[in-house]
Image (cartoon, rainbow, N blue to C red):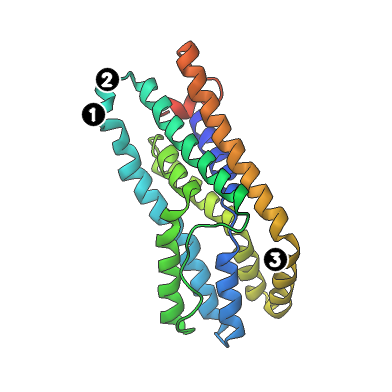
């Protein structure tokens, strides 16, 4: 149970750090270009469910295989956990530095152009989901969720991450379902212009928090031989 809570906490923190309005911006652009509401909903569904499914698959394959690498013969199981945590922490803190120096920086995403029909938006959503691997917070969750033995936990963690990181798209999709998307589009454009700097700062701080916690935990293992913050997650369950 501790491990499940650790994974979900990591997913929530990384979701805040990975908060990205790009999905909503693509949907808004499609609506402005005359796309049908159900096609925009298809795009949102493919982005949300596709990204979660893709991450779950990676966690259950690539994430789990990290335990079997050759270094596991040189380190005890907890040592492997500390090494993985330190690597993830370094990546998150490096991305935080990039975002701090360039507040507008974010992982590459598919361009807004292309067809606005069902096929075009569906393919665009699939491409958007696949490019999640370019986001350091997503990669971090792939690694951390892969250390839990439960497929359900990994799936729930990735679903939580995408719902938080693509919260603007979720809000827009709900508005479309309720037939209130015209006002939501205007609200999104105003809100993004007003709150973009604050959202960027919040995401950077979340990156520092997540990276700092993992680095502290790994350092504590080096000093004491035990984990301080995430014992369940670090031991793989």
Name the residue beneath numbered marker 3.
192
Q: Residue furthest bottom?
A: 34
- 122 or 95, nearer to the observer: 95
x and y, in percent, of residue 122 in the image: 43, 75
For residue 197, which quarter of the picture? bottom right
CA distance for labels 3 and 2: 49 Å
- Answer above or below: position of 155 versus 21: above
CA distance for labels 3 and 1: 46 Å
Name the residue beneath numbered marker 1.
70
- Answer above or below: position of 15 versus 234: below
- Answer above or below: position of 176 versus 18: below
Residue at the location (61% across, 76% down)?
28
CA distance for labels 2 and 1: 8 Å
Residue at the location (50% across, 45% down)?
157
x and y, in percent, of residue 205 in the image: 65, 42
- Answer above or below: position of 145 versus 215: below
For residue 179, which quarter of the picture? bottom right
Please tell me which of labels 3 and 1 falls first in the chain. Answer: 1
Q: Residues within 10 Å of mark 1 (few under 14, many from 20)?
A: few
């Amino acid at each position: 149970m501790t491990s499940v809570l650790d994974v979900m906490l990591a997913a929530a923190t990384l979701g805040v750090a990975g908060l990205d309005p790009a999905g909503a911006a693509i949907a808004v652009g499609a609506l402005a270009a005359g796309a049908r509401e159900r096609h925009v909903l298809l795009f949102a569904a493919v982005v949300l469910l596709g990204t979660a499914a893709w991450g779950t698959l990676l966690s259950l394959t690539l994430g789990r295989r990290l335990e079997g690498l050759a270094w596991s013969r040189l380190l005890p199981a907890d040592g492997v956990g500390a090494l993985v945590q330190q690597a993830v922490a370094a990546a998150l803190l490096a991305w935080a530095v990039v975002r701090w120096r360039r507040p507008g920086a974010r992982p590459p995403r598919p361009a807004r152009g292309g067809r606005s029909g069902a096929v075009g938006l569906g393919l665009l959503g699939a491409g958007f989901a696949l490019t999640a691997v370019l986001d350091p917070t997503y990669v971090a969750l792939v690694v951390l969720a892969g250390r839990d033995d439960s497929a359900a936990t990994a799936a729930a963690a990735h679903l939580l991450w995408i719902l938080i990181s693509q919260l603007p798209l979720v809000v827009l999709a709900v508005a479309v379902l309720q037939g209130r998307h015209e006002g939501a589009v205007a609200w999104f454009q105003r809100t993004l212009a007003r709150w973009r700097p604050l959202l960027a700062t919040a995401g950077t701080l979340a990156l520092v928090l997540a990276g700092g916690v993992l680095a502290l935990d790994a350092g504590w293992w080096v000093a004491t031989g035990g984990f301080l913050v995430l014992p369940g997650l670090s031991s793989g369950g």
